[in-house]
């Protein structure tokens, strides 16, 4: 019996020692996690970084005593189902806040890149963009899920202090993730004093909001906004009206506001849809709110809060984004003018001339398919950062077009920057040596920026900041080249005839 107990103790100690020496087992502030090997990296997926109660700020995640196996992404935040691709069984309200980490070496001290997914403020998941591609290049890549749509951004502040922060809990979740990185990322080989935040589309808008949140100061040190200069956050004056309209649609009396905690998600979103249709002045429906407390200034209007104006930043867009696709169609000059005149009026001929000044080898189809929103907004913000702050601002334009539709769409750049083109055959249907080289160049720029706040590295083409040249733009195509103020005349006309 005595020998049996001895063998049991020795066996348990062996297990403990083996766990402590296993690089796939990492101790966090809330418990141990066990990751998996993934394409030359160690991946830790679905780690809880916060716990949530509906419409309340996030709280620290509960502790656990066992080793949590973190081998798959956490559930989607509650959102509209996407056919058979994402159903309600793939979602969770209570277990929304999960974080993923990819690293090559848990004993290193590498820069950290935090990715905030796109999908506007209503949909999306960290599972859309896995991080092993950049982690292979000696950074620690982190991504998160957080509360979205009506659960992340319903402003109920007019119903009392209990709900003071309800309109921004989606952004407060991202703040909680940054705090988790501060407290834990060293154990994954990351440097908490060298964190780059980055996001695409709605994720880029969220990055802008984070740069206007006083509580986030010091938790990140660089920023990247991909096709995400979203201008015009809600204010409490407008978002609280939407919150009141939702409550009215639900038939809840103000004194019974806590009943909203138990309304089924489907009923809540349907009430939100009706309320949004009836309330004017709402910027994008359920979205972050400049409340003067959590978010103290309008992001991208034209830049960020003063305390973030020393943050190096990269901002860019794709050639076509979500513009109309005229490729594959015969277009005459008269037809092109007819398509442009509702926007440019008497300046239509001048706009056409300005386009061909900027793109001498372009076509009428190129001109009509060109993005006229994200690039324009990106230039406005880069100029504002340069004029009002001390940080370098770098601008890019992703101009590579898919051979299948001759289009450079919203999000087509992501697999190149993330070094994952092999996984994105819908966006990169043919991988040629030129395409592989473009991926290498783009991801190298990103890793260099994460290390130093300067994308320039090695023998890559020199990429100047706005502080160093006249509106320099790095154009990413099969030929990578920088051009200065090449489309400024065209952008002036876009500014004149559009609302930013």
Image (spheres, rainbow, N blue to C red):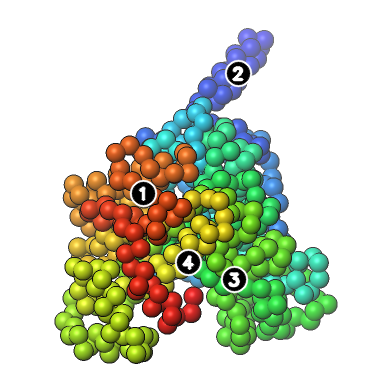
Q: Secondary structure at mark 2?
A: helix
Position in image of residue 361 (x %, y %): 19, 68
Q: Secondary structure at mark 4?
A: helix
Q: Nearer the viewer, residue 267 or 408?
A: 408
Q: Quick one: label 1 or label 4, which is nearer the N terminus?
A: 4
Position in image of residue 121 (x %, y %): 54, 67
Q: Answer above or below: position of 415 versus 18.
A: below
**Separation (CA) of disc 4 from disc 2:** 61 Å
**Separation (CA) of disc 2 from disc 1:** 55 Å
Contact between labelled residues 4 and 1, with CB atoms less than 8 Å apart = no
Q: In the image, is 412 to the left or to the right of 153?
A: left
Contact between labelled residues 4 and 3, with CB atoms less than 8 Å apart = no
At a point 68% along the width and 55% down the height, the residue shown is: 214
Circle on res. 233: 3
Disc tally is: 4
Residue 347 visible at all: yes
> Around disc 3, counting alpha carbons within 10 Å, would you say few (fewer than 14), some (14 to 19), or many (20 or more)?
many
Q: Quick one: label 1 or label 3, which is nearer the N terminus?
A: 3
At a point 30% along the width and 51% down the height, the residue shown is: 421
Q: Which residue is mark 1?
A: 463
Q: Quadrant of residue 275?
A: bottom right
The quadrant in which the N terminus is found is top right
Position in image of residue 293 (x %, y %): 73, 62
Q: Quick one: label 2 or label 1, which is nearer the N terminus?
A: 2
Position in image of residue 230 (x %, y %): 51, 68
> Around disc 1, counting alpha carbons within 10 Å, would you say few (fewer than 14), some (14 to 19), or many (20 or more)?
many
Q: Secondary structure at mark 1?
A: loop
**Separation (CA) of disc 3 from disc 2:** 55 Å
Q: Which residue is mark 4?
A: 380
Q: Secondary structure at mark 3?
A: loop
**Separation (CA) of disc 1 from disc 4:** 19 Å
Circle on res. 13: 2
């Amino acid at each position: 019996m005595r020998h049996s107990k001895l063998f049991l103790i020795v066996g348990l100690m062996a297990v403990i020692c083996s766990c402590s020496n296993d690089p796939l087992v990492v101790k966090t502030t809330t418990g141990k996690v066990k990751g998996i090997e993934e394409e030359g990296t160690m991946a830790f997926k679905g780690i809880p970084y916060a716990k949530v109660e509906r419409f309340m700020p996030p709280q620290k995640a509960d502790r656990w005593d066992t080793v949590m196996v973190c081998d798959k992404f956490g559930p989607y935040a509650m959102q509209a189902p996407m056919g058979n691709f994402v159903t309600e069984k793939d979602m969770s309200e209570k277990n929304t806040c999960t974080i993923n980490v990819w690293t090559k070496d848990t004993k290193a001290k590498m820069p950290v890149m935090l990715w905030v997914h796109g999908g506007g403020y209503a949909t999306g998941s960290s599972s859309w963009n896995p991080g092993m591609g950049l982690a292979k290049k000696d950074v620690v890549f982190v991504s998160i899920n957080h509360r979205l749509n009506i659960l992340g951004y319903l402003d109920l502040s007019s119903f009392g202090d209990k709900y003071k922060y309800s309109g921004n809990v989606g952004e407060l979740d991202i703040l909680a993730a940054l705090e988790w990185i501060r407290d834990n990322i060293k154990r994954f080989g990351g440097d908490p004093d060298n964190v780059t935040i980055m996001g695409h589309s709605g994720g880029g808008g969220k990055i802008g909001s984070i740069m206007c949140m006083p509580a986030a100061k010091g938790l990140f040190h660089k920023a990247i906004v991909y096709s995400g200069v979203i201008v015009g956050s809600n204010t409490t004056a407008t978002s609280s009206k939407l919150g009141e309209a939702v409550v009215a649609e639900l038939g809840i009396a103000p004194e019974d506001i806590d009943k909203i905690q138990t309304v089924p998600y489907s009923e809540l979103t349907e009430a939100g849809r009706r309320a949004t249709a009836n309330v004017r002045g709402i910027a994008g429906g359920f979205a972050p709110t400049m409340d003067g407390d959590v978010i103290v200034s309008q992001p991208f209007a034209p830049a960020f809060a003063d305390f973030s104006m020393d943050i190096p930043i990269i901002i860019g867009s794709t050639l076509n984004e979500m513009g109309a696709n005229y490729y594959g169609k015969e277009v005459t000059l008269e037809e092109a003018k007819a398509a442009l005149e509702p926007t440019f009026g008497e300046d239509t001929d001048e706009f056409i001339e300005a386009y061909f000044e900027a793109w001498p080898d372009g076509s009428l189809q190129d001109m009509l398919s060109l993005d006229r929103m994200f690039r324009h907004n990106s230039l406005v913000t880069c100029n504002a950062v340069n004029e009002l702050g001390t940080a370098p601002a770098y601008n890019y334009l992703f101009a590579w077009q898919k051979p299948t539709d001759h289009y450079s769409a919203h999000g087509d750049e992501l697999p190149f920057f993330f070094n994952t083109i092999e996984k994105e055959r819908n966006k990169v249907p043919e991988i040629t040596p030129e395409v592989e080289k473009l991926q290498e160049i783009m991801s190298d720029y990103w890793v260099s920026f994460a290390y130093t706040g300067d994308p320039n590295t090695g023998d890559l083409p020199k990429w100047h900041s706005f502080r160093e040249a006249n509106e320099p733009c790095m154009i990413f195509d099969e030929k990578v080249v920088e051009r200065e103020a090449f489309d400024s005349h065209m952008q002036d006309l876009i500014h004149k005839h559009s609302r930013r």
